[in-house]
Image (cartoon, helix red, strand yellow):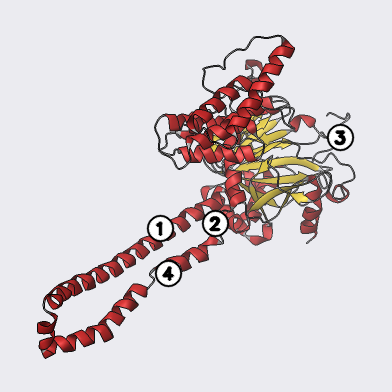
Amino acid sequence: MRRFLSLVSWTLLCCCWTAQADIFTSIGQMTDLIYTEKELVQSLKEYIKAEESKLAAVKSWANKLDVLTRVSTSDPEGYLAHPVNAYKLMKRLNTEWSELESLVLQDPSDGFISNMSVHRQYFPDEEDEKGAAKALMRLQDTYQLDSESFSKGKLPGVHSSAFLTVDDCYDMGKTAYNDADYYHAVLWMQQSLRQLDAGEEAVVSKADVLDYLSYSVYQMGDLPRAIELTRRLVAIDPSHQRAGGNLRYFERLLSKQLIELKQVYQPASEEPIQLGTYARPKDHLPERETYEALCRGEGVKMTNARRSRLFCRYRDGNRNPRLLLKPVKEEDEWDSPHIVRYLDVLSHEEIEKIKELAKPRLARATVRDPKTGVLTTANYRVSKSAWLEGEEDPVIARVNQRIEDITGLTVETAELLQVANYGVGGQYEPHYDFSRRPFDGNLKVDGNRLATFLNYMSDVEAGGATVFPDFGAAIWPRKGTAVFWYNLFKSGEGDYRTRHAACPVLVGSKWVSNKWIHERGQEFLRPCGLTEVD
């Protein structure tokens, strides 16, 4: 219980989780939607089959009655002169037409509608769709992917039949527009227009696309192009509600600017709008460019001199009995600060068990708002996480013991094993694992986060690296391995070089589990140094 309370108090370090409906943040949970959709398709087929069966029965009735009425109407008196025909007419109108009425009134859709109602509670909502769109834009920015490649499903090293239609691109652009994100609105409206110009059929009209595109281009400060696009809109739809007024406004504004700057009008560039046409707006993250370059595998500062200082070795945990017969394989990933990778830390069976235990509890990761103190979701942390206790299953207890054996540190004061699944565009932007707030109550109990032990529980097809912008390191996920580093110097001071990030997952599903090891109990296992930076 004390460990659980300690964990709760540690939420002040922005590592708290709460259950929400953000399905898109976890591939693990999105796979359930795949099977749900398959079940609904089967239900839809059954409904269609029932409708066809009903229609066939009605058609059979219609054909039979058509033959009868042709005969009866050719000579009504002669037809009714026969008593059998008179009886059958009475019977048809009294009984058989009532049966036909009942058949027509049957509604085979009841089963399908009922099935839909059961599953609808698990469907993504508008916020989930919006989040998925933003995730694609995040991937576009981080990995510098142009909208055309994205719309055709062309991702680095991946061959896929996935594609985005005109209407998909339009909806992407509209999502950005509604958030006043005109940079992405331009990119996606332009792609929608490009596909329309190429002859692709769509629900959305070219006038609607030009309406959003021209105004977004204006917001990006490109008046000549905004004017050209608005003129094109007016040519397509002269009675458009806003186009004429916007065009006059843009022309007056441009004329005023040219007079003030004493410049001559230059027609809009004929080059199509693409990635790089407009500068991406700056945001809250000072190391954004460095961080994203590392995610792409660029700017990694691994020199020959540094590489010569990296080694691999066997570790037996200072002759730990559990590691003597099978020492762990250790590889240096970085020299200073020292980051190591351990091989074959988790077996496939252990990984599957951990995922099985975590899946029912996965909840959208939240952070504590520094101004209000309220837990909230944040775009810079997009994943789903769960906490697992050692008492829950022998596998968790065994993993905890293995971490203690490998690191030589006690996990008695460590946090529970945290399991995280990163889905579409899942990421965690640059952050520190240790607390920089000396007033955090949890520091008085178990101390700060001394070290991080991070297990990779899946390979990732593209993206998903762990990067350290301060010194230019990028560590790529390898299933079954783990990386380890110290967040604090021996003096207890935070090592600010360890600011790190989980890059967005471009293709695939990233599963990790980690153990945050705290200071208390390590006094004789990792003694203090003589200086602050030992």
Compare marks 2 and 4 and give the one earlier in the sequence: 4
Q: Secondary structure at mark 2?
A: loop
Residue 111 shows which numbered tag? 4
What label does residue 491 carry, if any? 3
Upstream in sequence: badge 3 or badge 4: 4
| Between 419 and 322, the one nearer to me in the picture | 419
The residue mark sitting in front, 3 or 4, is 4
- Of the two numbered discs 4 and 1 on the same chain, state the one appearing first in sequence: 1
Alpha carbons under labels 1 and 3: distance apart: 61 Å
In contact (CB < 8 Å): disc 2 and disc 4: no
Work out whether mark 2 precedes mark 1 in sequence or the reverse, and give the earlier one.
1
As drawn, is 250 to the left or to the right of 490? left
The answer to whether residue 295 of the structure is visible from this angle is no
Determine the secondary structure under disc 4.
helix
**Amino acid beneath label 3:** Ser
- Judging by the rendered image, the residue that carries numbered circle 2 is 123
Residue 218 to residue 258: above or below:
below
Using the numbered discs, state the Cα–Cα distance from disc 3 to disc 2 in whole angstroms: 50 Å
Say what amino acid the circle numbered 1 marks. Answer: Val
Instruction: Tell me if mark 4 has few (under 14), some (14-19) or many (20+) residues whose alpha carbon lies within 10 angstroms of its own.
Output: some
Q: Which residue is mark 1?
A: 41
Q: Nearer the viewer, residue 529 or 63?
A: 63
